[in-house]
Image: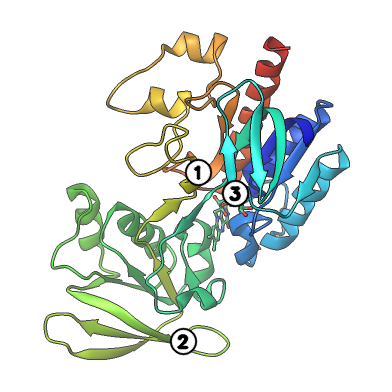
């Protein structure tokens, strides 16, 4: 059995940032980076909005840099998936298969993934398909784009795209949007936006980049083919929290709750602002000594820089917690 000060579960921007801070603070740190070391940015090409890289940086290169930086201060990185956790006692236990690792604190940074249509569009990610308009809209200047979805995320993506693209067609499988009225009005009143109601994208094609899609009208069954430059899939996200179900408090959509998100939630304020910022641990989950950061917590911003920022917050809270629980 190997014992660490902290086990970080997740090898994306939030996990690696917390590992950098924790190991630089001379704590012993194990990072379990899972099946997708580097996290979501591994699938993207150029990242243009991460500060410090004025010419942009390729997603996989940015993540290799973060991992190297964490290792520089002594963090151990294993490309293994945590398969079971027991977070109840003072000593936390994390299993990788049959092997158990122990630590005084755990940082959960297992991220999230975008829901996909399920027609094989993943293979075009970074080559015409995107799940993040805030990240990628600027690459579609004067281009023809489509957005799939009908909720607030789809409306936000559409509004991000109209600043750059010549045409944005929203494909929605129902006859009306689910999004808030104000967002719908902004989208529908924009002259660049067209909507294909009661429609589903059923096929994607092109080589090596996405160049066309087939759309089916679900009422008439009619299928039409459209040439395009970009397809933005905006049908929701799934936080990676299965491992923590019944063990840590999750919100109604499955995101990990921390003191900070509980405080921000519109239903109840669990703690006072003073308690949280001055005396408490804003990134602590429902269990003492277990902290959460990045997209597994954040259902709003979902950016590499916000995930990294939250990773820093979780590390500072963990350091303070360990200091107070020697
Ligand atoms: C195609 C694409 C392009 C993007 N482009 C940009 C961009 O240009 N700029 C930007 O700011 N943001 C961008 N984003 C968003 C950004 O990638 C995310 O906000 C960010 O990666 C979230 O970081 P994270 O560390 O919270 O989680 P993730 O990056 O999701 O990492 C989660 C990590 O947890 C690991 N994990 C999961 N379960 C387990 C387990 N049981 N055990 C061990 N490890 C586990 C995974 O292997 C992974 O390493 C993009 C996202 C996508 C999908």
Is the residue marked by circle 2 packed among few (<14), some (14-19), or many (20+) residues within 10 Å?
Answer: some
* Mark 2, residue position: 211
Q: Which label belongs to residue 193?
A: none
Q: Position of residue 11 (x, y in %)?
A: 67, 49
Query: SS class of the residue under badge 1?
Result: helix
Query: Residue 126's image quarter?
Result: bottom right
Q: Earlier in the sequence, mark 2 or mark 1?
A: 2
Query: Residue 119's image quarter?
Result: bottom left
Dots 2, 1 in contact, CB < 8 A: no
| Disc number lying in front (2 or 3) | 3
Q: CA distance from mark 2 to mark 1?
A: 33 Å
181 with respect to 299 (left or right): left
228 with respect to 294 (left or right): left
Is the residue marked by circle 1 packed among few (<14), some (14-19), or many (20+) residues within 10 Å?
Answer: many
Q: Earlier in the sequence, mark 3 or mark 1?
A: 3
Please say whether residue 75 is visible from this viewpoint. yes
């Amino acid at each position: 059995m190997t014992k660490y000060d902290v086990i970080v579960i997740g090898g994306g921007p939030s996990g690696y940032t917390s590992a950098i801070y924790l190991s630089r603070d001379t704590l012993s740190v194990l990072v379990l980076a899972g099946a997708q070391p580097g996290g979501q940015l591994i699938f993207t090409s150029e990242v243009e909005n991460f500060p410090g890289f004025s010419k942009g940086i390729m997603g996989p290169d940015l993540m290799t840099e973060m991992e190297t930086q964490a290792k520089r201060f002594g963090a151990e990185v294993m490309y293994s998936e945590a398969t079971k956790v027991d977070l109840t006692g003072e000593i936390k236990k994390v299993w990788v298969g049959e092997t158990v690792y122990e630590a005084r604190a755990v940082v959960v940074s297992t991220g999230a993934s975008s829901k996909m249509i399920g027609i094989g569009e993943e293979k075009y990610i970074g080559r015409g398909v995107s799940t993040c308009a805030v990240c990628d809209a600027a690459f579609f200047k004067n281009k023809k784009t489509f957005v799939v979805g009908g909720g607030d995320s789809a409306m936000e993506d559409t509004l991000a795209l109209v600043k750059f693209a010549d045409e944005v067609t929203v494909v929605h499988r129902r006859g009306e949007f689910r999004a808030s009225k104000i967002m719908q009005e902004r989208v529908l009143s924009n002259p660049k936006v067209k909507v294909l109601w009661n429609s589903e994208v059923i096929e994607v094609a092109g080589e090596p980049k996405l160049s066309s899609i087939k759309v089916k009208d679900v009422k008439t069954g009619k299928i039409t083919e459209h040439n395009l430059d970009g397809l933005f899939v905006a049908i929701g996200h799934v936080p990676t929290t299965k491992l923590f179900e019944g063990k840590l408090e999750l919100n109604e959509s499955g995101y990990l709750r921390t003191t900070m998100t509980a405080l921000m939630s519109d239903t109840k304020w669990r703690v006072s602002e003073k308690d949280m910022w001055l005396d408490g641990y804003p990134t602590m989950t429902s269990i003492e000594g277990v902290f959460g950061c990045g997209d597994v917590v954040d259902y709003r911003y979902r950016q590499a820089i916000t995930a990294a920022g939250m990773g820093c917050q979780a590390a500072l809270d963990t350091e303070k917690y360990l200091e107070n629980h020697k």
